[in-house]
Amino acid sequence: MNSRERILAAINHEKVDRIPTDIWATPEVWQKLVEYFGEGADIRAALHIDGFAGVGAAYVGPLLPEAPPGETVDMWGIRTRSMEHGTGTYNEQYYFPLADAKTIDDLDRYPWPKPDWFDYSKMREGAKALHEHHAVQFGYMAPFYYHNLLRGLEQSLMDPLEDPELTHEILRRIGALRYRGRFGLEYFPKMKAGREYRPITEEELKRTSVYAIKIEAWSGKENWNERADQSGEWPALEEK
C-alpha cells in the first residue's frame, strides 16, 4: 500500500498493511531531524510517515498591516509575538480581534475576510499532482478553534453559556468563509463527490457532536490543601 491507499482504507474502516502515520513537529524538532538525516533528505519517507497532502486557495486579498519585528498579523487581525521558551521559540497570540464584541452590531463592524480574497485557479491542478500517492486534504475546517482565536480561549468557552445568539452568529460567519471561501467548493460546481472529493458523512458528523455538561462544582483536580484552594467537597490527597 502507498500512503494514499493506507489512509483511505483506514478512513473507510478497511484492513491496512500497517497503521497510518503522521507527524506534527516544532521547528527545533525538524532541525534536529535535518541534522540527523542530512540536508535534502526526505525525512517523511525515512520515518515512513504517511500524512495528508493539502491544497488550498492562495491569499491575494488586501495587503496585511506591517507587523513589528518578531510579530505576525494575519487576515483575521490575529496578532502573535515570538516568545522564547528555553527549548524553542514559538509565536504566542496576544491579540484577539473580537475579544470585546458584545452584540451582532459589533460583529458587523468587524472586517471579516471574504471568499474573493483568494485565488482558486491552481487548486485542481495541485490536487491532481498529489492524487496518485497521497490522500489530499481539501481545506481545514475548525470553526470553534477560530472562535477561540478571535475571542480568546476563556471567553470562547463561556460564550455558549452567556450568549448563545452571539456564539451561533460568530460560528456561522466563520463557517461561511472556511467552507465557501477557503475550501473553494463554491467555485468548483463541477467537482464530483466520490471521484474528485469525498464528502463528510452524517455518521462522521455525529461523532463530532459536543455535549454540554452542567457542572455545579468544579475542582480542576485534587490538590493538597496547603498548595491550592480546595473545595470542601473534595478530600485532600494524602502526602506521598
Image: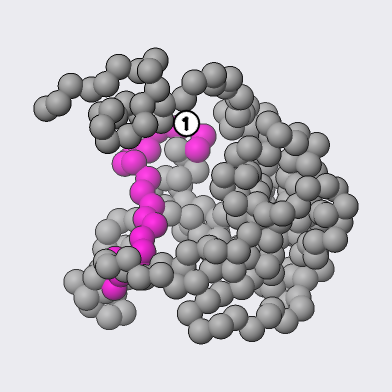
Is residue 44 at least partly visible in the picture?
yes
Along the viewing direction, whichever of 101 and 27 lies nearer the viewer:
101
Is residue 126 at least partly visible in the picture?
no
> Which structural element holds mark 1?
loop
Q: Is residue 22 magenta?
A: yes
- Left or right: 189 in relation to 49: right
Residue at 32% x, 66% y is: 85
- Left or right: 126 in relation to 33: right
> Which quadrant of the view contains residue 42?
bottom left
Residue 92 screen position, x and y as percent: 48, 64
- Left or right: 185 in relation to 4: right
Residue at 83% x, 54% y is: 106
Range shown magenta? 11-31
Residue 83 screen position, x and y as percent: 41, 70
Q: Is residue 48 magenta?
A: no
Q: Quadrant of the C terminus?
A: top left
Q: Identify the residue at the far left of this view.
A: 240
Residue at 68% x, 39% y is: 159
Residue 81 screen position, x and y as percent: 50, 72
Residue at 30% x, 56% y is: 48
Reply above or below: 74 against 106.
Answer: below
Q: As shown in the figure, which amino acid type bears the numbered disc 1?
A: His
The chief SS type of the magenta part is loop
> Which quadrant of the view contains residue 190?
bottom right
Q: Which residue is mark 1?
A: 13
Along the viewing direction, whichever of 46 and 174 lies nearer the viewer:
174
Reply above or below: 166 against 150.
Answer: above
Q: Residues within 10 Å of mark 1 (few under 14, many from 20)?
A: few
